[in-house]
Amino acid sequence: MTGRMGWFGTYGGQFVPETLIPALDELTRAWADARHDSEFRKTLDDCLHRYVGRPTPLYQARRLGKDMGGVRIWLKREDLNHTGAHKINNTVGQVLLARRMGKTRIIAETGAGQHGVAAATACALFGFECDVYMGEEDMRRQALNVERMRMLGARVLPVSSGSRTLKDATSEAIRDWTASVGGTHYVIGSAVGPAPYPDMVRGLQRVIGNETRTQLRELGVEPAAVFACVGGGSNAIGMFAPFIDDQPLPENPSVPADSSGPGQVRGVSDNRAELVGVEAAGAGLASGQHAASLSLGLPGVLHGSHSYLLQDEDGQVTPAHSVSAGLDYPGVGPEHSWLKESGRVRYESVTDHEAVAAFGDLCRLEGIIPALESAHAAAGLRKEAEKWKNRDVVICLSGRGDKDVEEVRRFERTRGADVQSPDQAS
Ligand SMILES: *Cc1c(COP(=O)(O)O)cnc(C)c1O
């Protein structure tokens, strides 16, 4: 354990085999070093600017806002990043860190394939060998992303254990790392896993929130609320981070004052934006078919850290379900567990139906095909639009939805005959 570092209240920690502790210690030191190194930050900021395409626009969705009864909606357009989502912010950062540490090989886990593609992209850019673990079931469902990873020069390693999905791919990647730590860095795709990953991924995704706050200030806008979808929690924590740090919690032992990492913007603000994380309620919270670990899970240990997760009475992890592959994970980053407990962030959930309806709204009203994950954030706002009438509200549009076009079609054909219009949705 790293003392109080790496803990968010009682959540987080390093629940890993003994052999991994030296690697996590090495990574903790390397990240602590790099985040303050102006050379590293300049290289990363340069890459985010010239290669990824940052800063991403903050765009006012007027037609959608009008449709919601007069909410001033601001979309943070992470869908416009190279590779189409926020995940690249994390992978270029971690691969640059691996280069600094003298590693030569990268491994990653992937579910829908989005993180795998982002990792393969960063590896192509910086000349790394790249192995991506992916469940066989996911490989079948996400064949296009498997081909993209291969074209980018990565090897996709099929995982046939368990449910052959993300949870199993992650376990396999941890196993690989345990045997290969010397020259290999493991790029985790969300703000999950053992310390220092949750804090490091937060630091690398924080650029989303930093840019948003700067852009809002330029517009003279104080947001009343900020919405983001929560799978493992990386786009949400990156978006929320500056708003949280503006208003330090009385006793958050684990987020040092200087934890903001590359691209940070310092400044005092009396911002009191309400922060709302939106989980996937799948077929409905009562159906048992959902991915709402914070809403309905219990604390336990999965993939190296203590956090909320979906489990049965015996503590066995139960499978998640969501129409959105990127939210289909039974756990959640430990900082979100702490933010839930402390009350600084409110966590809600929306069903597959509500998310698909919001997907359609963004298409037809704004000309934006959003990722189904991001559509959850928009649906979360829709459910309480009345409350935000005439106020400024930010939505993190974490990614674009080209990948989801077929899934939405299938959903509408099979379950969507009764896709509720947004106002009918409960
Ligand atoms: C992977 C993904 C998510 C969910 O991951 P978080 O770590 O919770 O952000 C959300 N949106 C998009 C577009 C994704 O690709």
Image (spheres, helix red, strand yellow):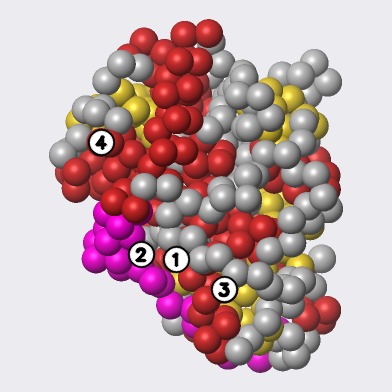
Instruction: Give amino acid for label 4.
Output: Arg
Q: Residues within 10 Å of mark 2 (few under 14, many from 20)?
A: many
> Depth-wise, is mark 4 or mark 1 nearer the camera?
4
Q: Cβ of disc 3 within 8 Å of ligand 1? A: no
- The prevailing secondary structure element of the residues shown in magenta is helix
Identify the image quadrant of residue 348.
bottom right
Residue 99's disc number: 4
Residue 213's disc number: 3
Q: Residue at left 44%, top 82%? A: 367
Q: Cβ of disc 4 within 8 Å of ligand 1? A: no
Q: Gap between marks 4 and 2, in whole Å?
A: 22 Å
Of the image marks 3 and 4, the number of the one nearer the N terminus: 4
Q: Give the x, y percent position of residue 267.
A: 60, 69
Asked if the residues shown at circle 1 and circle 2 are in contact, with their CB atoms under 8 angstroms apart, the answer is yes
Q: Is residue 95 left or right of residue 351?
A: left
Q: Give the x, y percent position of residue 401.
A: 43, 63
Residue 192's disc number: none
Q: Gap between marks 3 and 1, in whole Å?
A: 14 Å
Of the image marks 3 and 2, the number of the one nearer the N terminus: 2
Instruction: Give amino acid for label 2.
Output: Asn
> Depth-wise, is mark 3 or mark 1 nearer the camera?
3
Q: Residues within 10 Å of mark 1 (few under 14, many from 20)?
A: many
Instruction: Give amino acid for label 1.
Output: Glu
Report helix, strand or loop for mark 1: helix
Q: Between 370 and 89, which is closer to the camera in this rendering?
A: 89
Report helix, strand or loop for mark 4: helix
Q: Gap between marks 1 and 2, in whole Å?
A: 6 Å
Tag 2 residue: 81
Image quadrant where one finds the N terminus: top right
Asked if the residues shown at circle 4 and circle 2 are in contact, with their CB atoms under 8 angstroms apart, the answer is no
Report helix, strand or loop for mark 3: helix
Residues in magenta, as a range = 41-68
